[in-house]
Image (cartoon, rainbow, N blue to C red):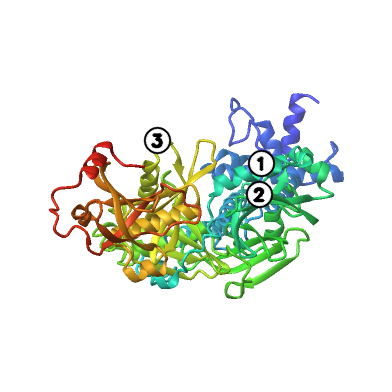
Amino acid sequence: MNHDEILEMLRRSGVEVPGSAEHSAEEPIDVEVEVEDIPARESKDPAGGEAPKSARERKKAARAREKAARREHVDKGRTVPPFMEKLAHWSRTALIVALIVLGIAALVSYWWFHPALNIHSPRVWSWIILVAIFAVVALKVVALRSARHATLFNRLAYVPLAVILAFFVGLIMGEPFIPGNAERYANVLKTTDGDFAKDIEEVDYSDVPVIDRASAQLLGSRAMGSIPEFVSQFEISPAYSQINYQGRPVRVSPLTYADLFKWLSHRGTGIPAYVLVDMVTQEAEVVRLKDPIRYSESEPLARNIDRYVQLKYPTYMFDQKSFELDEKGTPWWVFPVQKRTIGLFEGTTIQRVVLVNACTGETEDYAIEDCPTWVDRAYPSDLIIQQYNWSGAYRGGWLNSWLGQQGVVRTTLGTDGELGYNYLAQGDDIYLYTGVSSVTADSSNVGFILVNQRTGESHYYPVAGATEDSAQASAEGQVQNLKYEATYPLLLNVAGQPTYFMALKDNAGLVKMYAMINVEHYQSVATGSTVASTQESYLQMLASSGALSEDEVAANGVEDQLSGTIASIAQAVIDGNSHFYVTLEGDGAIYDFALPEMLGIVRYRVGDAIEFGCAASSDDEEEGTVRQVVSLAGARANSEAAPAAEPSAEASDAEADGPTA
């Protein structure tokens, strides 16, 4: 077919060709475009007769017309991004396949990451926003492909945009500057004032935790090392939750698979044990289980404890979980369930608790007020601190929280700048303790709080004194020559006095000594190699300083009343303070009269009768032990006529030689 015949065929088909009124002879012909725009009509044979097209040709012509119309529609919307234009040219089959792949990817991602399906969950909103963005793109692409419904699809694209806008509105509605929100923040944790001496039981030293988390981890690792078949296959989880177990403060942590290959080897038999560390006796043991732990953090697939619980309760928002034991020693995972009370994401509190048997996967769902008494950690520690800081910041309103700051308080920080808190065992429950200081104070507390971690009940005790890090520094200064490090203080009730108790550890992390410091008078530090000896020194210090009344001294067995005849007196200056050291006839002990508290001792000399009170002695006290005198009474029977200013020759010689110890 030559050139003229092609032009003739195009004229018969209704195509404008050169030679007509609309085209000049020199105008080029866009053959591709013109052919694509050929109307669907029956072709004619050379003789002028009508010859029907084949089905294949008709289908091809229809596709050409559709493509041309789509291209013309897309060309009109040149403001869209290039990738949308490319998607608009995809075939329907390609788009369907792409949607199926995206759907499968979304389901797999949900199973793997398992966000809570709850509009108050920030994690699920990241998915909602991602889906909304995909929806906007999809609707825009459909609008580009369909000229007839372009307006409809363009309007529908505003729906996912409105969803994204709702997210930001909900975010702003949770801010404390919104009217009424400051009061809501202040009331998330309701705290009442308490009486420390009445509310907190006096300490029983057989139940005082003497090690911290780091020491418990060290002891647990040593216990694990004693079982060779476990060492190469399992590791200890860093959890080490502090709980009350059978009336004892302990830390407990499950074993985990050492790596993926160890999981492949042992997934059928599970995890055989957990580690239990007694915080009083410092004994650690690896407790073997009859039924192994099958649901744990180290499970990568369906039995991963976080995935298992979230998929079983898809709408629950879980807070920080803990590993605990019931009174029979059965391991459980405790999952607190969050509730938002302000805006979309703020004002978090706990409304329920889900318990998961770590061995069987059995679950129990309780309202927070019905939580079993053996559960110790329904309210996570970090959440309690956050709630009280809200209360301390916004009790006077939002403006006051950053302008006047009248009455604004916060919880104290640890020496590392992180949240500073510890735990106190009372009855069957664990209480979180932390100091409270003014936002402008550096080294003093205005009080402290105790919060029941099972019920969320909170009490504030207005006891002014040193911050925890100041107490730690004071204790470390007492033994600075040994370079021991003080643990974070534990709050105790000793003879009705709020007292910081802490262990002193060496560089290897081993507990070597203990220290007690009065919260209100943190310059007074008592130390000892045992808890009992530390208590004795501390009570002596309280008695000599007048912090304890005579009735309190007698009730606590702090003071022994002694009398006798002075055998010798010696004077010495220690750390800038004067001390008189006295011995009695027939008594091998040395009695320390510290000035200025015991100033009356200067009136006595050798041979005088004397009556005084000193710190209670222990059963294993050796001869020559120095005992602290806490009170002085009585009269000098043998020296009323002697001049008080002239000490005996024996006393003068003793003063020159120093203490007779």
Q: Tell me whether the residue at label 3 lies in contact with that at label 1, contact meaning CB atoms closer than 8 angstroms.
A: no
Q: Tell me whether the residue at label 2 lies in contact with that at label 1, contact meaning CB atoms closer than 8 angstroms.
A: yes
First of labels 2, 3 by sequence position: 2
Q: Position of residue 526 (x, y in %)?
A: 39, 51
Nearer the observer, disc 2 or disc 3? 3
* Element marked by disc 2: strand
Q: Amino acid at mark 1?
A: Arg
Q: Position of residue 567 (x, y in %)?
A: 30, 50
Q: Amino acid at mark 3?
A: Asn
| Disc 3 residue crowd, few under 14, some 14–19, many 20+, Cα 10 Å | few
Using the image, tell me which numbered label, if any, was put on residue 606: none
Q: Quadrant of residue 657?
A: top left
First of labels 3, 1 by sequence position: 1
Residue at the image point whose x is 43% and y is 64% from the top: 493
Residue at the image point whose x is 57% and y is 51% from the top: 133
Give the number of marks: 3
Using the image, tell me which numbered label, if any, was put on residue 284: 2
| Disc 1 residue crowd, few under 14, some 14–19, many 20+, Cα 10 Å | few
Q: Quadrant of residue 309?
A: bottom right
The answer to whether one can see residue 658 in this image is yes
First of labels 2, 1 by sequence position: 1
568 to 9, vertically: above or below: below
275 to 365, vertically: above or below: above
Q: Nearer the viewer, residue 361 or 627?
A: 627
Q: Which residue is mark 1?
A: 222
Using the image, tell me which numbered label, if any, was put on residue 481: 3
Q: Position of residue 466 (x, y in %)?
A: 33, 54
Q: Amino acid at mark 2?
A: Ala
Q: Is residue 414 left or right of residue 266?
A: left
Q: Nearer the viewer, residue 278 or 451?
A: 278
